[in-house]
Amino acid sequence: MEEFEKWISTAGDRLKRDFSCDVVGLALQNLAGLDITWPYVIGHQNEKYKYITVRYGKGIAGKVISSSRPMEITSFPNGIFGKSTDYPIMLAEQLISAYAVPLICGDSPKGALLIGYRNMHLFTEEEKNQAIEVARRVESSLPDHFVTYGRDRF
């Protein structure tokens, strides 16, 4: 797991620099159950992300994982589905704009890669494609335990 954490830190720092964004986060579905946590957040303002757990289908990560589709928020909390409290990472990090891409393990989405801004940002097609490309690289480097149990336990 340590090697994966180093890789995520390096890739996240690079992505943060390339996008000139405020936050890069990685949400992963727990091995047991449908809960989703944010184990890696680069550019965080506080430690709240460590305590965030959302249910499958809730928040930006839960919606991305349940739909297996990217999600864009450009002016939080305007235009979201549900209540703003359903989006704890947006609240905790004071994000206004975010783009999240699903991470596929085996045949199912099991995580989300998030790029976030604390001001309004309209994502270009180039930025969206770059985020998807990075997500594909993250998928190929998911921790061994996640991949090992991916098909058998989910």
Image (spheres, helix red, strand yellow):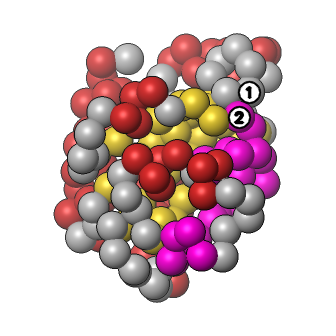
On residue 34, the disc is: 1
Q: Residue at x 71, y 52 (%)?
A: 63
What span is in magenta? 55-78
Other-residue count near label 1 (Cα within 10 Å), few / some / many at <14 / 14–19 / ≥20: some
What secondary structure is found at the residue carrying circle 1?
loop
What secondary structure is found at the residue carrying circle 2?
loop
> Which image quarter is the C terminus in?
top right
Would you say residue 72 sits in the magenta stretch?
A: yes
Inspect the image, locate mark 2, and give the three-letter code of the amino acid beneath it. Arg
Q: Position of residue 31 (x, y in %)?
A: 65, 18
Q: Which residue is mark 2?
A: 55
Check if mark 2's residue and mark 1's residue have beta carbons within 8 Å. yes
On residue 102, the disc is: none
Q: Quadrant of residue 119?
A: bottom left
Answer yes or no: is residue 26 visible: yes
Inspect the image, locate mark 1, and give the three-letter code of the amino acid beneath it. Leu
- What's the CA distance linking mark 2 and mark 1? 6 Å
Front-lying residue, 65 or 8: 65
> Which image quarter is the N terminus in?
top left
Q: Residue at x 56, y 69 (%)?
A: 77
Other-residue count near label 2 (Cα within 10 Å), few / some / many at <14 / 14–19 / ≥20: some
Front-lying residue, 44 or 143: 44
Would you say residue 52 sits in the magenta stretch?
A: no
Q: How many marks?
A: 2
Q: Position of residue 122 (x, y in %)?
A: 45, 84
